[in-house]
């Protein structure tokens, strides 16, 4: 016989138990809510930190060129393009240069648009086909700027440069003193070869390299090939076939100078300090002038007064020829050989010391015009030089145009931040 199962009556929940359950659920809800709030707060903090440290700096405008704005992200990418493969120090050192390039290229792009000259996206794409590196917007802009420069030079400015001009075929050399120029002139008059003497003696780079023969050029081209207008002005007013007298040029530089040196005092090298010498000096532009000044000093003339009148060493000239305390590795080899020679007598001026590592200015030209032509066709190389000059002059005018609004918000701290980030991203 099956025993009948007796159902238990449901257990009645007391008010006290109900109250405890309700309090427990309330605490659980509070704990959950607090947890959610904490997690949300952490995410907010992380998000705010990311926004402040990453997003906002990269998206703030740092350069404005009229209506075009460039943000920090663009600037960092530009540093990576121009500074790739270099050190962090180099990256920072070129930060201002990259800033200038961005401004210049954008101004040129805007100005070229007004001339009807532009570069299409397809032209940029074609140029980028052979690039192995990732293509960014900045790299596209760099390529676009180079293509634009080529178009301007070979298209627009091709028609701005003349195809013929007044020209001279001239020979020239630059010598350090009037006496040397007079001596060389005598040798030329006696039949020695101008080219051989110019190649051996000229102290101006272009005339020395070309052995004096400058070939046919216009005034404008010669002005780009030579650092001085003195021989050019003479040549375009001179008689053909006549060798000039020595022509003085006070501004032409040359890679040679002549010193008179006196070692006042020496300090022997220590454990942590190298040998030092206290030096007085005067720098002259020619051996002849240096010897003349030495003779005047030996005759009792005031050294400081001679420094004031003749020295070409600007830093010591302001201190009456006092170079102060110098160490090895800071002067030219010709000077150090004398200064740190233990046999040199203290406070006695040296004989003339030739120094081919220290430039000076001043000297004398010898010029001879071989032929002249009032309207000669300009050589292709010369036209390239003229187109390049016309383009550079145009870019300068565009960059300096007062109607342009060019603003940079970059300071040294921002440039350093950008350079560090660019280097880290490339590393």
Image (cartoon, rainbow, N blue to C red):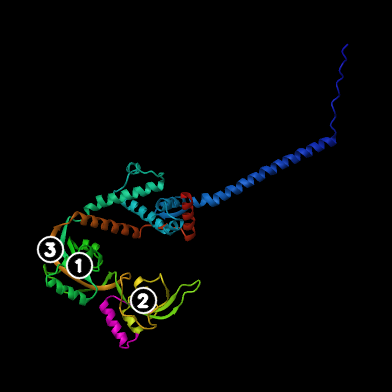
Cα distance between the residues tagged 1 and 3? 21 Å
Identify residue for label 1: 198
Q: Is residue 288 left or right of residue 399?
A: left
- Determine whether the residue tagged by mark 2 lies in a helix, strand or loop: helix
- The magenta stretch is 280-302
Q: Earlier in the sequence, mark 3 or mark 2?
A: 2
Verify whether residue 299 appears in magenta: yes
Identify residue for label 3: 372
Q: Earlier in the sequence, mark 1 or mark 2?
A: 1
Cα distance between the residues tagged 3 and 2? 50 Å
Specify few, some or many for label 1: CA neighbours under 10 Å numbering under 14, 14-19, or 20 or more. Answer: many
Residue nearer the viewer, 202 or 227 = 202
Specify whether residue 405 is in view: no
Q: Report x, y in % for residue 77.
A: 43, 50
Residue placed at 58% from the left, 49% from the top? 48
Figure check: 216 above or below 116: below
Cα distance between the residues tagged 1 and 2? 31 Å
Q: Quadrant of the N terminus?
A: top right
Specify whether residue 192 is in view: yes
Figure check: 43 above or below 378: above
Q: Is residue 45 left or right of residue 389?
A: right
Q: Report x, y in % for residue 177.
A: 23, 75
Identify residue for label 2: 338
Residue nearer the viewer, 222 or 220 = 222
Q: Closer to us: mark 1 or mark 2?
A: 2
The quarter of the picture where residue 184 lies is bottom left
Q: Report x, y in % for residue 423.
A: 46, 52
Which of the numbered marks, if any, corresponds to residue 150? none
């Amino acid at each position: 016989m099956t025993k009948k199962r007796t159902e238990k009556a449901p257990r009645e929940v007391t008010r006290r138990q109900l109250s405890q359950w309700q309090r427990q659920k309330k605490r659980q809800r509070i704990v959950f809510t607090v947890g959610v709030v904490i997690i949300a707060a952490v995410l907010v903090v992380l998000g705010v930190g990311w926004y402040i440290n990453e997003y906002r700096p990269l998206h703030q405008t740092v350069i404005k060129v009229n209506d075009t704005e460039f943000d920090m992200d663009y600037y960092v990418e530009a540093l990576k393009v121009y500074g790739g493969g270099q050190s962090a120090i180099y990256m920072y050192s070129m930060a201002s240069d990259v800033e200038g390039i961005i401004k210049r290229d954008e101004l040129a792009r805007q100005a070229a648009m007004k001339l009807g000259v532009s570069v299409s996206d397809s032209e940029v794409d074609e140029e980028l086909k052979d690039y192995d590196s990732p293509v960014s917007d900045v790299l596209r802009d760099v390529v676009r700027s180079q293509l634009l420069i080529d178009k301007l030079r070979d298209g627009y400015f091709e028609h701005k440069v003349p195809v013929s001009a007044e020209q001279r075929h001239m020979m020239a050399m630059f010598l350090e003193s009037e006496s040397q120029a007079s001596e060389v002139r005598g040798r030329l008059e006696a039949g020695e070869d101008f080219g051989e003497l110019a190649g051996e003696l000229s102290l101006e780079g272009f005339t020395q390299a070309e052995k004096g023969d400058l070939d046919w050029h216009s005034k404008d081209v010669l002005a780009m090939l030579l650092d001085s207008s003195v021989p050019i002005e003479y040549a375009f007013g001179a008689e053909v076939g006549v060798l000039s007298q020595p022509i003085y040029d006070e501004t032409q530089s040359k890679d040679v100078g002549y010193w008179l040196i006196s070692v006042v005092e020496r300090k022997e090298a220590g454990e942590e300090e190298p040998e030092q010498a206290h030096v007085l000096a005067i720098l002259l532009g020619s051996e002849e002038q240096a010897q003349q000044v030495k003779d005047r000093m030996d005759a009792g003339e005031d050294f400081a007064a001679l420094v004031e009148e003749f020295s070409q060493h600007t830093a010591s000239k302001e201190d009456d020829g006092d170079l102060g305390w110098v160490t090895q590795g800071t002067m030219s080899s010709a000077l150090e050989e004398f200064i740190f020679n233990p046999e040199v007598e203290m406070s006695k001026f040296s004989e003339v010391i030739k120094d081919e590592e220290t430039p000076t200015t001043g000297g004398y030209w010898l010029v001879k015009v071989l032929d002249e032509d009032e309207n000669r066709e300009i050589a292709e190389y010369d036209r390239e030089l003229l187109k390049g000059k016309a383009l550079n002059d145009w870019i300068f005018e565009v960059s300096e145009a007062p109607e342009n609004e060019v603003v940079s918000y970059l300071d040294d701290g921002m440039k350093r931040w950008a350079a560090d980030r660019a280097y880290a991203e490339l590393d």
